[in-house]
Amino acid sequence: TGFWPVLLPATISIAAFGLGHIMYALTLQQIEASVFSVFFATSAFWIMLFGLVLLHEQIYYLQTIGIILISTSIFIPYWRKFKGVSGHGLVYGLTTGLLFGIAVYTWSIVGRETDTLTWCALSFIAAGLAAYCIKPTKPSELMSILRKKHLSRMLLLALIYGLGSLAM
């Protein structure tokens, strides 16, 4: 379809992923990873809401029951832990879910109109650069990740992340 129709959703996706990764790190400094996983799961709610409102998708009775059952099964095991979460952890966690919801929603719009593999690679790199531009680190800190000790882990994680993006 061309470059211009996907420019806005691509830009939003890249910025939301970049901000989302920063919020992800900030959230994990405030709350336990197990509790954060539930906040992160709220991104699915946002994706569904954007689809209903912006794409005029429909949701049916059985799907509504499924959403309620899945959401309940996610939140019930962590209910006690949520009572202790407040302040920055709560706000950061919910913001992270929202940002990743926006990012995935707009990513899928671009993915439908472009070559998926190319868009996956470009968005992965661009989101990392966006995060770096938003919250720059010292070059020495960045280089410590690229040392041999961490490089193989980073490459493995990048491969898994890329495969997950392709599966979307």
Image: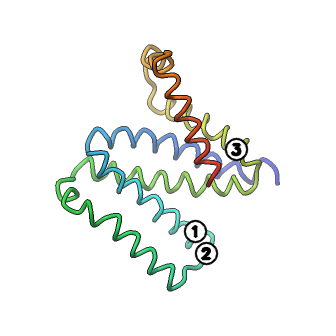
* Amino acid at pointer 3: Trp
Instruction: Report the residue at 61% width, 75% height from top.
Output: 57
In whole angstroms, how far apart are the C-alphas of marks 3 and 1? 21 Å
Q: Please provide percent x and percent y for residue 27.
A: 32, 43
| Between discs 2 and 1, the one toward the N terminus | 1
In whole angstroms, how far apart are the C-alphas of marks 2 and 1? 6 Å
State the SS at label 2.
loop
Answer few, some or many: residues within 10 Å of disc 1's Cα (few below 14, many 20 plus, some between 14 and 19): some
C-beta proximity under 8 Å, tags 2 and 1:
yes
Q: Give the farthest residue toward the right.
A: 1
What residue is pinned by disc 3? 119
In the displayed structure, would residue 132 be above or below residue 102? above
Q: Please provide percent x and percent y for residue 147.
A: 49, 15
Q: Please provide percent x and percent y for residue 123.
A: 63, 41
Q: Tell me the quarter of the picture where residue 33 sits.
A: top left
State the SS at label 1.
helix
In the drawing, what numbered circle is on residue 60?
none
What residue is pinned by disc 2? 57
Q: Quadrant of the C terminus?
A: bottom right
* Amino acid at pointer 1: Gly
Q: Please provide percent x and percent y for residue 24.
A: 39, 43
In the drawing, what numbered circle is on residue 51?
1
